[in-house]
Amino acid sequence: MALKNVTLLSTTLGLLTLPKLTWMGSPPSWPISANKQMEEATMMDKSRRFAFFGVKQEWGIALGFLTKAQLDELITYNELNEILVFTNNNEDATPYNIVIISFSYEPERMDIRQLERYKVEMTLREA
């Protein structure tokens, strides 16, 4: 299975193509959840009212074997205070306006030479 580009676009920094996924065994998936956006209020008579604002998607992304330069680039995009454009060409070519709502990384050593590699996990939410 040939993987296509997955990108983040910033009006400040430009286009970032995420590193290609590498794996052993079956290919990984990027889970997508669709959360209903709503507010709930309890009225004086104890009845409840709901206001619905639509469904927003979230993507959980995990990338491994990243170099320090790739990690630094992702950290820079995470620290931006702007809406980014996310396109996952493996699913469809639809661009989504997103914000990064969670971001974490840790060192990852996968060989005897102990190369400086990192694992990143982040959650993107449709804006």
Image: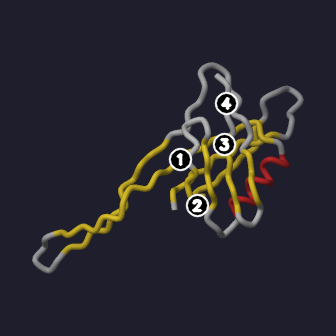
Which residue is pictured at 80% across the width and 47% down the height?
70
- Image location of residue 76, percent across then percent down: 76, 60
Q: CA distance from mark 3 to mark 2?
A: 15 Å
Name the front one of labels 2 and 4.
Answer: 4
Residue 6's disc number: 3
Give the residue number, with chain letter if any, for mark 1: 59
Residue 3's disc number: 4
Which residue is pictured at 17% across the width and 77% down the height?
43
Which residue is pictured at 71% across the width and 42% down the height?
119
Residue 67's disc number: none
Q: CA distance from mark 3 to mark 4?
A: 9 Å
Name the front one of labels 3 and 1.
Answer: 3
Give the residue number, with chain letter if any, for mark 2: 99
Point out the tag, 1 or 2, that comes first from the N-terminus: 1
- The amino acid beneath tag 2 is Val
Q: CA distance from mark 4 to mark 1?
A: 17 Å
- The amino acid beneath tag 3 is Val
